[in-house]
Image (spheres, rainbow, N blue to C red):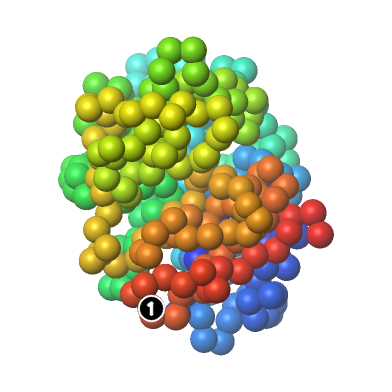
Amino acid sequence: MYDVIGDVHGSHDALRRLLMRMGYVKGPHGYSHSERQAIFVGDLLNRGNAVGKVIKLVRRMQDGGAAQVVMGNHEFNTLAYHIRKPNRKSAYLRPRSKKNRKQLSATLKQLSKEEIRSTLSWIRDLPMYLDLPQIRVVHACWDPWAIRKIEKAYAEFGQWTDEFMHKALTPTKKLARAVEWTLKGKEQRLPVGKGLTDLDGFYRRRLRVRWYLPPEGKTYAEYALVRDNHLPEIPLPRKLDDAPCPYAESEKPVFIGHYGLRPNPEPALLASNVACIDYGVARGDVLCAYRWDGEKTLETDHLVWVNVSS
């Protein structure tokens, strides 16, 4: 049985309280449960005031067999920030711009150089997704086409090698699109004059969408994954920017993070077999998990959470 835990973003105290609430006990090899295993959906770092403690806690659980971890876009961005471009020693795959430094600032400030080197080495060993016999876990989006592209690239270049990363961050490569969808989800440009402000305070004109649903007949507001009163109630264009990949009800349950949903007033499921468990820990809301006990149809009462500020 699994406890799938949402984005932690350096919230060590909330993570510790959530684990204890679910019956995990701290022993000589970290937190563990006698009958269950935790799965983290990624985004452990880059926000919050205890990035180092979170990484240490999760790595100890992983080393002891009490947890599995998948890659999040923040782990990917951190790795890219530290890999130089081919034949350009002064440039990095993720430019060291003001925006990118701000996104990584908590990690860069809180970890020593040696801790950063160790963390980067650990990140390179993380899978981008888990396709287990009865469930799937991915940071943002399960798209079969993207999964196939990533698997092919792993076989050709190796997982998270510099060459893989170079290809994954070359906009003209199909691999870049596959990685973008998997770690950041699918998006649609908003109509002219419409935009949203993200958690980092940056203005965006692209909308994160409900990729697991068919888009036909829906408005921008209805297809938005993060609802906002300012979204237009006008029909989506016939051709979307990112190809839809509706997730059939017959598919095994998939668990995602990434989207920073609002509890309103409590966490809820997205579909009968789709659960987002990122409920705004970076915003100070709640750290959420889903306690999976083998069910094919997900149940709301299996969601468990703790308030970040408690």
Q: Residue furthest bottom?
A: 34
Q: Residue at x 39, y 80 (%)?
A: 294
Q: Residue at x 62, y 53 (%)?
A: 263
Q: Residue at x 38, y 23 (%)?
A: 189
Local crowd size for mark 1, using a 10 Å CA cut-off: few (<14), some (14–19), many (≥20) = few
Q: Residue at x 29, y 67 (%)?
A: 252
| Residue 203 vertical placement versus 229 (above, below) | above
Q: Does residue 171 appear in the picture of this structure?
A: yes
Left or right: 1, with 296 as reference point = right
Left or right: 118, with 80 as reference point = right
Q: Position of residue 47 (x, y in %)?
A: 66, 41
Count all numbered tags in the image, as a single digit. 1
Quickly name the residue at label 1. Answer: 295
User: In what element is the residue under mark 1?
Assistant: loop
Quadrant location of the C terminus? bottom right
Q: Based on the displayed image, in which of its 4 quarters is residue 96 positioned?
A: top right
